């Protein structure tokens, strides 16, 4: 990607750049001065969400004319993989953009009982608060010192892919809902077994689903059907239960209790423990509540 910056003197064109990635998705958040990008083609679907300023996309129509589309705060645009596009911006601009693997979208389509060859539709200036919410939630997770972990982020990524297929694909035969039953007894036991054996690790949705023998999409929905909880919510509950047990039956330092229960730092441990019990880990131990 070639960027032509329109800056003067010794100005630094990029004010800041932040990036993160999970399986199937790259996330970038950048703020920069005026510039333009030559026509390019990406092999991933790209979602662009303006957070400040305005950017203009350009594409050549079949008749050879140039079509301009303006992206502003509160809107978003989707450029499918393989679609040539140019863009420019005349003032300071901040963008959140996500690159989504074609495989992830194909798997989401298969989960909705559609052809894996489904195509996404090029869309500009759409007002889609949920799509923006997905992006902002992933951005917040990637920047947080108390991140909830890969299981939470991957669940958002898979939900985003389903949203794209439902609302921005060429198919007009997508059912509003697909009935999915709960997990069988054996699969539920395997899911609980895997989660409880890996409480200290940053487990992923794909890892749990593979162990159970289901697709991530099917597993997440079936798990919630069975328990009333998302896999992330269940994982957090089990970590809290382990922490209670360790607080009551060991003299381990509080920091060690948090680590052994799967919490990344003491602050995160204390915050979630208080949320679930209305007490700090220290007070819980002193009152011997377990």
Image (cartoon, rainbow, N blue to C red):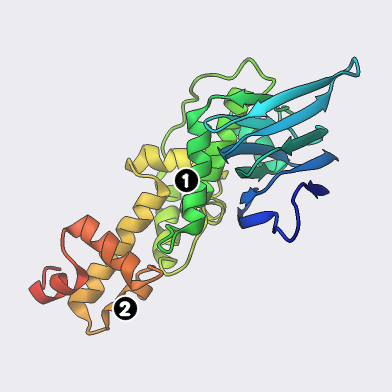
Looking at the image, residue 212 sits to the left or right of residue 71; the answer is left
Quarter of the image for the C terminus: give it. bottom left
- In the displayed orientation, state which residue is furthest to the left: 287
Residue nearest the viewer, comparing 5 with 237: 5
Asked if disc 1 and disc 2 are in contact, CB closer than 8 Å, the reply is no
Q: Which residue is mark 2?
A: 255
User: Which secondary structure lies at badge 1?
Assistant: helix
In the picture, residue 168 is in which quadrant? Answer: top right
Q: Residue 197: horizontal and vertical position, in percent?
A: 42, 67
Instruction: Name which quarter of the figure residue 90 lies in.
Output: top right
Which residue is depicted at the point 46% across and 31% down? 180
Report whether 133 appears left or right of 289: right
In the picture of the structure, the residue carrying the numbered disc 1 is 137
- The mark total stands at 2
User: Disc 1 and disc 2: Cα gap in Å?
Assistant: 28 Å
Residue 122 visible in this rendered orientation of the protein: no
Of residues 247 and 3, which is closer to you in this image? 3
Q: How many residues crowd around disc 1 within 10 Å: few (fewer than 14), some, or many (20 or more)?
A: few
Where does residue 19 sit, x and y in percent of width and height? 61, 56
Q: Give the structural element (helix, strand or loop) at label 2.
A: helix
Q: Is residue 208 left or right of residue 281?
A: right
Crowd band around label 2 with a 10 angstrom C-alpha radius: few (<14), some (14–19), many (20+): some
| Image quadrant assignment for residue 22 | bottom right
Residue 61's place in the image compared with 184, above or below, is above
Image position of 27 with respect to 250: above or below:
above
Say which residue appears at 22% left-offset and 68% top-offset.
244
Query: Eyeballing the image, is 177 above or below 159?
Result: above
Q: Residue at x 62, y 15 (%)?
A: 173
Q: Nearer the viewer, residue 217 or 160?
A: 160
The spot of residue 53 in percent (x, y) is: 59, 37
Q: Earlier in the sequence, mark 1 or mark 2?
A: 1
């Amino acid at each position: 990607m070639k960027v032509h910056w329109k800056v003067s003197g010794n100005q630094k064109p990029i004010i800041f750049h932040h990036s993160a990635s999970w399986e199937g998705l790259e996330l970038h958040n950048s703020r920069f001065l005026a510039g333009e990008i030559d026509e390019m083609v990406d092999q991933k679907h790209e979602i662009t969400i303006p957070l400040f300023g305005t950017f203009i996309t350009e594409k050549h129509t079949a008749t050879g004319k140039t079509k301009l589309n303006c992206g502003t705060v509160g809107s978003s645009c989707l450029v499918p993989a393989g679609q040539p596009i140019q863009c420019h911006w005349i003032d300071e601009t901040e963008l959140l953009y996500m690159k989504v693997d074609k495989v992830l979208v194909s798997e989401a389509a298969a989960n909705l009982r559609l052809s894996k060859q489904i195509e996404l539709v090029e869309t500009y200036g759409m007002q889609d608060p949920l799509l923006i919410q997905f992006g902002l939630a992933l951005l917040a997770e990637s920047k947080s010192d108390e991140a909830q972990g890969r299981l939470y982020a991957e669940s958002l990524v898979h939900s985003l892919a389903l949203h794209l297929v439902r609302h921005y694909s060429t198919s007009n035969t997508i059912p509003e809902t697909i009935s999915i039953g709960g997990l069988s007894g054996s699969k539920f036991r395997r899911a609980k077994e895997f989660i409880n054996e890996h409480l200290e690790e940053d487990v992923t949705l794909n890892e749990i689903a593979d162990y159970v023998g289901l697709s991530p999409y099917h597993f997440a929905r079936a798990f919630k059907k069975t328990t009333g909880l998302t896999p992330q919510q269940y994982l957090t509950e089990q970590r809290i239960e382990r922490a209670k047990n360790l607080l009551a039956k060991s003299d381990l330092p509080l920091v060690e209790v948090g680590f052994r229960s799967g919490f990344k730092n003491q602050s995160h441990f204390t915050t979630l423990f208080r949320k679930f019990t209305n007490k700090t880990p220290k007070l819980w131990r002193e009152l011997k509540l377990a």
